[in-house]
Amino acid sequence: MFFAIEHGINYSVEASLYNIHGLLALLSFIIGYYISTFYKRKFDIFVSIIVSFVFYLVAAFILAHVPIHVVFTPIAVITIITLVTIYFAKIPDNAKKINTKITFKDLLLRTILTVVIFLLVTSIPKIAPVNIAGIFSAFPSMMFPLLLIVHFNHSSNQARTILKNTPSGLSSIVIFCVSVHFTYPILGIFLGTLISFITCIIYIVIQLKLLDYFGINVNAKQKKSDFKIS
C-alpha cells in the first residue's frame, strides 16, 4: 500500500509478486534464527542475528534471479510455507511462563527499531530495482525488534516459540499479494487493499479449518507451560 501511494499503482502491482518471493526469504530468516537459538554460549544473540541475516540475504539474492509467475509462484510458495508450518506444528512450544511486564524501555526500543527498518525498506525503491524492493518489503520489521527484546530479556526458548509459530500466517500474505496484483489496477489502492484484506481473512478461516480437519494443530501444546508476556 505504501509503495502504491509513493511510487504508483503499476510499481506496487509488479512489486507485489516479488513480495511473494520475499516471504520465502523471510522463511529463511526464521529458519536461520530458529536453528541459531540452539547455540547456548557467549554472544548467542549476536550469533542469531548474523546467522538469520545470512540466511535471509542468501535467499533474497537467489530469489531475485528467479522468474515470477502469477499462478505457479504463489502455489509453490504456499506449498513450501505449509510444509514448514506442519513441521513446526509437530514440535511442542518450549517456553516458560513469563509474568514480567513489558517496560517503557522495551516499547521505545521496539518502536525505534520498527520505524528505522520501515523507513529503510520503503526507501529501497529509490536505489534498487523493483524485484529487490519487492523482496525486501517482506522483511520482518515488526517481528525482528520483538524477537530481539524477548531473546535478550528472557531466553532463546521464548524466541524459538515465537519463530516456530510465525510461518502459519505467512501463506495468507501470499493471498494478499495476489489479490493486490489483480485488484489495484481495477479498484484502486484503498478499495483494492480492503478487498485484499477480506480475501486474506477468508483464506485464514479456510486454512485453519483444513489444518484442523487433517489433525494439524498450529498452536502446539506447550512443552512446559503457557508462553505469556503481560
Image (cartoon, grey):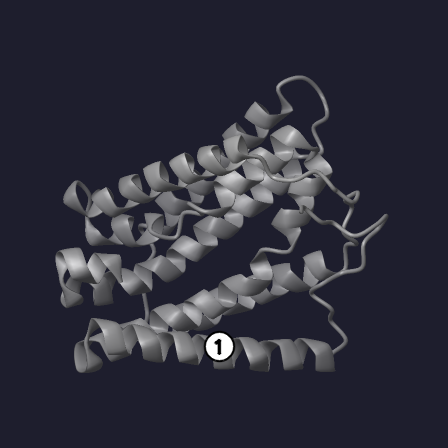
Query: Which residue lies at the image location 24% right of the left edge and 57% below the top edge?
Result: 2
Q: How crowded is mark 1: few (under 14 residues within 10 Å), some or many (20 or more)?
A: some
Vertical relation: 101 (above or below) 204: above
Residue beneath label 1, please?
201
Q: Position of residue 39 (x, y in %)?
A: 69, 28
Q: Foreground: 51 or 197?
A: 197
The quadrant in which residue 127 appears is top left
Question: Looking at numbered disc 1 in the image, what kind of residue is underneath it?
Answer: Ile
160 over 74 or under it: above or below: above
Pinpoint residue 155: horizontal percent, then vertical percent.
70, 33
* Front residue of 10 and 97: 97
Q: Is residue 97 left or right of 108 when viewed as pictured? A: right
Mark 1 element type: helix
Q: Is residue 187 left or right of residue 178?
A: left
Residue most extreme to the right? 224
Residue sitting at 71 percent across and 63 percent down?
219
Can residue 52 be spotted in the picture? yes
- Figure quadrant of residue 195: bottom left
Can the viewer see residue 71 in this picture? Answer: no
Q: Nearer the viewer, residue 112 or 100?
A: 100
Which residue sits at x=33%, y=51%? 137
Left or right: 37 as drawn, with respect to 130: right
